[in-house]
Amino acid sequence: MELVIMKAFASSPSTSPAAFQIRFRSLFDSGRALAFPCDANGQVHLDDLSERARHNYLYARAVVGREYFRPEVLPRELH
């Protein structure tokens, strides 16, 4: 599965990495998804995202049901 994880670059060093991610799976390509750091409730802190990640997140939200499934909130996979 091709999973594109958009990283949040916090502007302050005191911000801890999110323990969860919100994942948008493609409707048409089963191996493709977009994922963004979030809290346990699926809340994404837009101010912490890079400009590109923010754009991709807002796009994914706008095309749910047309290009992506409804998002899932999952524990973040640590590498």
Image (cartoon, rainbow, N blue to C red):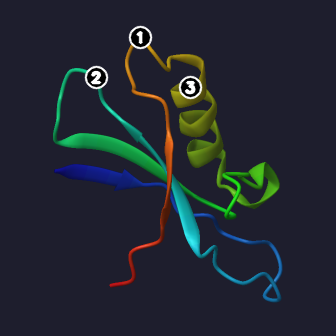
Classify residue 15 by image quadrant.
bottom right
Q: Nearer the viewer, residue 52 or 21?
A: 21
> Where is residue 51 drawn, in percent x and y?
66, 46
Circles 2 and 1 in contact, beta carbons < 8 Å: yes
Mark 3 Cα within 10 Å, few/some/many (few <14, many 20+)? few
Residue 57 percent location from the top left of the image: 58, 38
**Three-letter code, disc 1:** Arg
Check the image and name the residue furthest to the top: 66
The residue nearer to you, when weighing 51 against 15, is 15
Instruction: Residue under label 3, please give it.
Output: 59
Task: Report how far apart the C-alphas of labels 3 and 2 lie in the structure.
Answer: 14 Å
Type of amino acid at the residue the image marks with label 2: Leu
Is the Cβ of the residue at disc 3 closer than 8 Å to that at disc 1?
Answer: no
The three-letter code of the residue at mark 3 reads Tyr
Whichever of labels 3 and 2 marks the residue nearer the N terminus, that label is 2
Across and down, in percent, residue 61 comes to 59, 27
Q: Which residue is mark 2?
A: 27
Sequence-earlier tag: 3 or 1: 3
Q: Which residue is mark 1?
A: 66
Which residue does the image show at 64% across and 79% down from the upper left? 17
Secondary structure, mark 1, is: loop
- The kind of secondary structure element at disc 3 is helix
69 displayed left or right of 14: left
Task: Identify which residue, 48 or 36, lies in the foreground.
Answer: 36
Specify the quadrant of the image occupied by residue 18: bottom right
Crowding at mark 2 (Cα within 10 Å: few <14, some 14-19, many 20+): some
Q: Crowding near pointer 1: few (<14 within 10 Å), some, many (20+)?
A: few
- Viewer-nearest residue: 26 or 40: 40
